Structures are given as C-alpha cells and as structure tokens.
Amino acid sequence: MSIELVRIDDRLIHGQVVMAWSKAVSIKRIVVIDDKVAKDLIRKMLLETVAPPGVKVSVLNTLDGIEYLKSNANDNEKLLLLFTNPATIVTLVENGVAITKVNIGGMSFMQGKTQLTKAVSLDEDDKNAFKALHKCGIILQIQVLPNDSPVDIMTKI
C-alpha cells in the first residue's frame, strides 16, 4: 500500500479531485472514509460512479477504513484517502494508521464555522482535531489545487 495523498474535502470526489489531484499523484484507488457517507447508499453509489477511468473507489466507515488500511488488501495500490473532516483522521492515527501529511482542500462555511480562507472554514472541533494532528507531527497544508502554494494551516488557527 502506498498512500499518495490524504485530503480533506467535504465535497469528496468532484472536478478538482478527479481532474487535478488524481493525475498529480497517479492513484489507482480513492478511499472515502466517512461514517455518514458510508451509510448513505445513494451518495455512496454516486461517488463510486464519478471516479476517472481506471481508478477504483471504496467508501468505508471509520472502523472499516482502519481495518482496510491496516490489512494487506491494498498492497499493490496507490491510494488517495478522502475525508470530510479532520476528526476522522485523528481516529485513524490513534488506531495506528500511519499518516504523515494532510492536504486540506475544502471545508465549507456554515453556521458555527469561522472562515480561514476562501475554501476552508473551521469550527472548534475542527481546530482541536488539527491541533491533535499537529501534536503528532503531521504536516497540515491548505492546498486547493496541486499547482497552488501550500499554506500551513497552523499559522491560520
């Protein structure tokens, strides 16, 4: 297994992911890890159909995601891990999944969130999760597209 990119983007698989990031990191499988999405059969089916040709999609809940990433099931695959929030990544790291860098692409603004950048808005839970990941030595960079300059999110929190 080779985790090529760990990305937070609450839109999950969309134009930027499909067109830009999947090509930039040359992946063979997109793994969406999110409890709500894994329970939503229609959304899950849609995500599985929008991947680029030759790229497989798995939509898993958090526990299944941990098991999948710790197993040998994906030994020969280059993976793009997609999340809607940083708290799920904290759970993976706490359960022994090795993550060294997180790309933050899009976290939508809504009530209770503060806008950090044009594409990233956080609430207190998000901030606490990023602080926990930072304490683990994980690089946390806001970068919407591969050609954008990455920005350390901790300088914005």
Image (tube, rainbow, N blue to C red):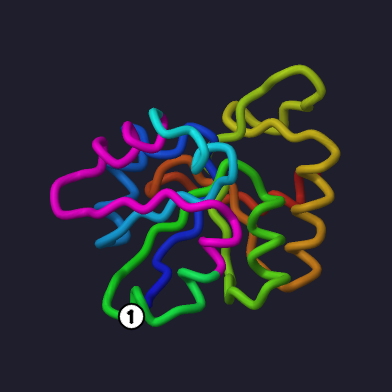
Instruction: Point out residue 89 in the picture as x, y percentages from the top left corner.
Output: 64, 58
SS of the residue under disc 1: loop
Q: Say how many tags the image has.
A: 1
* Residue 135 in the figure: left or right of residue 106: right
Residue displayed at 29% across by 55% down: 24
Front residue of this view, candidates 143 and 10? 10
Front residue of this view, candidates 24 and 127? 127
Residue displayed at 39% across by 37% down: 44
Residue displayed at 39% across by 58% down: 80
Residue 35 sits above or below residue 58 on the image: above
* Residue 154 in the figure: left or right of residue 15: right
Q: In which quadrant is the N terminus drawn?
A: bottom left
Q: Residue furthest left?
A: 53
Q: In which quadrant is the C terminus drawn?
A: top right
* Residue 146 in the figure: left or right of residue 61: left
Determine which residue is flagged by label 1: 75
Give the amino acid at mark 1.
Asp
- Verify whether residue 152 appears in magenta: no
- Verify whether residue 46 appears in magenta: yes
What's drawn in magenta, residue-wise?
Answer: 43-66
Instruction: Point out residue 144 in the picture as x, y percentages from the top left corner.
Output: 48, 40
* Residue 56 in the figure: left or right of residue 103: left
Front residue of this view, candidates 75 and 126? 75
| Label 1 crowd bin: few (<14), some (14–19), many (20+), radius 10 Å | few
Residue displayed at 65% across by 31% down: 117
Instruction: Point out residue 14 in the picture as x, y percentages from the top left corner.
Output: 36, 33
